[in-house]
Image: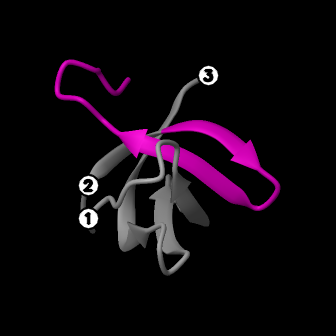
Amino acid sequence: MEKFGKVTIAIDPIEGKGQIKIGGEIWSAASSDNTSIPEDTKIIVEKIDGVKAIVKPLKTKEVIN
């Protein structure tokens, strides 16, 4: 099952920062392609690596169910 969420603290691979919200849960996050993702960007979770979600920005053609 795909999980969707929103960036709550900008994902910055250089500083190792980033946080997302999936439903009511807050997760530490990193981008799957090692790029920055701004706050308030909708994302899709590609995998969970320990306590960190690995995510990518949601493209407009992808539908959230």
Say if mark 1 contacts mark 3, CB within 8 Å: no
- Cα distance between the residues tagged 1 and 3: 25 Å
Residue at 69% x, 59% y is 52
Looking at the picture, how far across and down is residue 61, in whole percent? 19, 18
| Residue 38 disc label | 1
Give the number of marks: 3
9 versus 61 height, above or below: below
Front label number (1 vs 2): 1
Q: Indicate the amino acid at tag 2.
A: Thr
Would you say residue 49 sits in the magenta stretch? yes
Closer to us: 33 or 29: 33
- Cα distance between the residues tagged 2 and 3: 20 Å
Within 10 Å of disc 1 (Cα), the crowding (few <14, some 14-19, many 20+) is some
SS for callout 3: loop
Say if mark 1 contacts mark 2, CB within 8 Å: yes
The residue positioned farthest toward the bottom in the image shown: 15
| Residue 1 disc label | 3
Looking at the picture, how far across and down is residue 32, in whole percent? 52, 43
Would you say residue 39 sits in the magenta stretch? no
Residue 43, picture quadrant: top left
Q: Earlier in the sequence, mark 1 or mark 3?
A: 3
Q: Indicate the amino acid at tag 3.
A: Met
- Cα distance between the residues tagged 1 and 2: 6 Å
SS for callout 1: loop
Please provide the residue range marked out in magenta: 45-65
Dot 2 corresponds to which residue? 41
SS for callout 2: loop
